[in-house]
Image (cartoon, grey):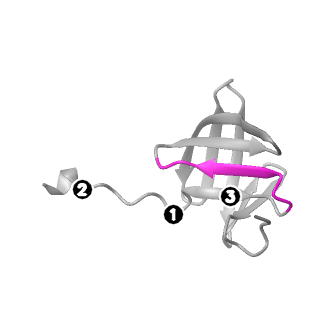
Amino acid sequence: MTSNDTPRDPHPYVGMWVTADGFIRQELLPNGRYDEARGNRRSAYTGRYTVTGSHLDYVDDTGFTATGDVRDGVLFHEHLVLYREDDPRARQ
């Protein structure tokens, strides 16, 4: 295996982010895609995202765009506040 064959570590923001009430669950996938569930509705929103520094740009599969910023380990995504799934502020 050459160094080009070595898998890259995923971006630190990859993983599950949830609202404090657990209603919204947004998974940032390592391939630049996201999958967002709302309540019992799985994959309510799906699309792609890019990261520049601590800023995220989202493009939903329908063409809708949104933004987010990570500050102090919290994802502020438009009007939502999301925490890492294992954060005590996030309900599992």
Tag 3 and tag 2, C-beta contact below 8 Å: no
User: Which residues are the magenta region?
Assistant: 21-30
As drawn, the residue found furthest toward the top would be 62
According to the picture, the residue beneath numbered tag 2 turns out to be 6
Tell whether 62 sits left or right of 89. left
Q: Is residue 18 magenta?
A: no
The CA distance from mark 1 to mark 3 is: 12 Å
Label 3: how many Cα within 10 Å (few below 14, some 14–19, many 20+)? many
The CA distance from mark 2 to mark 1 is: 18 Å
Residue that appears at 72% across and 29% down = 64
Who is closer to the viewer here, 84 or 76?
84
Kind of residue indicated by mark 2: Thr
According to the picture, the residue beneath numbered tag 1 turns out to be 12
Tag 2 and tag 1, C-beta contact below 8 Å: no
According to the picture, the residue beneath numbered tag 3 turns out to be 17
Tell whether 71 sits left or right of 20. left
Kind of residue indicated by mark 1: Pro
Kind of residue indicated by mark 3: Trp
Asked where in the image residue 39 lies, by quadrant, the reply is: top right
| Residue 15 picture location, percent across and down | 57, 57
Residue that appears at 47% across and 49% down = 30
Residue that appears at 51% across and 63% down = 12
| Lower sequence index among marks 2 and 1 | 2
Tell whether 50 sits left or right of 19. left
Asked where in the image residue 75 lies, by quadrant, the reply is: bottom right
